[in-house]
Amino acid sequence: MEKPANLTPSGAPVLDCGHDHECTLLTCDFCLMELPSSDAIREEGADYVAHFCGLDCLESWRREERLKSRSHPHQ
């Protein structure tokens, strides 16, 4: 049985949109939940842009990044 082409990777239906840039789905960089780009919270760095579904995920991600930087300081 073939999967319809109009589904997201998680299986949700993709609706037709006249403005594709407004319908882009992003993935929260912490919990991996899909969300529309208009609802994303962004954290911008020198080499990346991370997207989060809410302040809880953003704060959890920041906490983990601080812990990583303490255990692996830049050389």
Image (cartoon, rainbow, N blue to C red):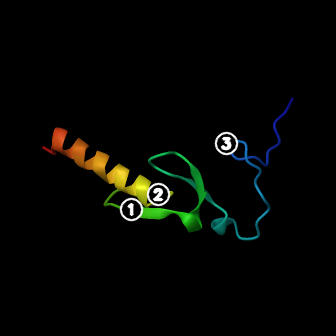
Give the secondary structure at mark 3. loop
Q: Which is more N-terminal, label 1 or label 3?
A: 3
- Kindly identify which residue carries mark 1: 43
Q: Nearer the viewer, residue 36 or 18?
A: 36
SS at circle 1: strand
Kind of residue indicated by mark 1: Glu
Give the residue displayed 75% in from the left and 46% down from the top: 7
Considering depth in this image, is 55 or 45 the residue closer to the camera?
55
| Residue occupied by mark 3 | 9
- Taking the spot 78% from the left edge, 59% from the top edge, the residue there is 15
Can residue 73 be seen? yes
Q: Is residue 47 above or below residue 39?
A: above
Q: Is residue 34 left or right of residue 70?
A: right
Instruction: Give the crowd class for mark 2: few <14, some 14-19, many >=20 residues within 10 Å.
Output: many
Amino acid beneath label 2: His
Query: Where is 21 relative to 11, above or below?
Result: below
- The quarter in which the N terminus is drawn is top right
Q: Position of residue 43 (x, y in %)?
A: 38, 62
The amino acid beneath tag 3 is Pro
Q: Are marks 1 and 2 in contact (CB under 8 Å)?
A: yes
